[in-house]
Image: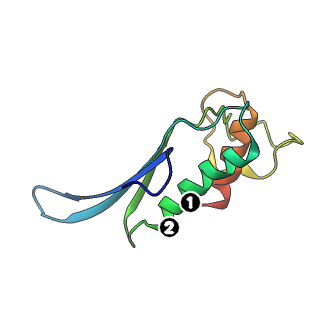
Amino acid sequence: MNDLGPRALAVTLTLQETTTKRAADVFLISAYYAPTSAHSEDEWDAYYDSITAALARCPPKAIAIIGSDANACIGTGEGERNDEKFDEGYEVVGRFGSTRVNDSGRRLRVYLETHQ
């Protein structure tokens, strides 16, 4: 049973290095089919709440990886710092890629910034 809702799945994998036999836990979150701009704030909140609930299950010392179809253009870490629609989220984005930012991208960047 998936109690994270219809848009998220979380699984822990234990990976073992072949020569040293060291093991590491990898916690994978698949957050798929994010709401689009036509969806309500409640649907967006539910989407990010499901990701937050999944992250809360991450085992200590595990490497957390989130894969998402977020419908987001997040821009780059350069150039948007004066964008009045967006504040502070640029630290979580690198400097390469498209400079385009949309509302979903702003929302994702703020989420990433507050959940580092």
Q: Position of residue 22 (x, y in %)?
A: 18, 65
Q: Is residue 64 left or right of residue 41?
A: left
* Residue drawn at the location 60% of the way across and 41% of the way down: 94
- Residue extending farthest front: 1
Q: Residues within 10 Å of mark 2 (few under 14, many from 20)?
A: few
SS at mark 1 in the image = helix
> Which residue carries the number 1 mark?
52
Instruction: Using the rendered image of the protein, determine whether residue 74 is visible from the camera's viewpoint.
Output: yes
- Disc 2 to disc 1: CB gap under 8 Å: yes
Q: Is residue 101 left or right of residue 66?
A: right
Q: Quadrant of residue 2?
A: bottom left
* Residue drawn at the location 51% of the way across and 44% of the way down: 7
Please name whichever residue, 3 or 80, is drawn nearer the observer in this view of the structure. 3
Quadrant including the N terminus: bottom left
Q: Position of residue 39 (x, y in %)?
A: 71, 35
What amino acid is at disc 1? Answer: Thr
Q: Is residue 49 above or below residue 104?
A: below
> Which residue carries the number 2 mark?
56
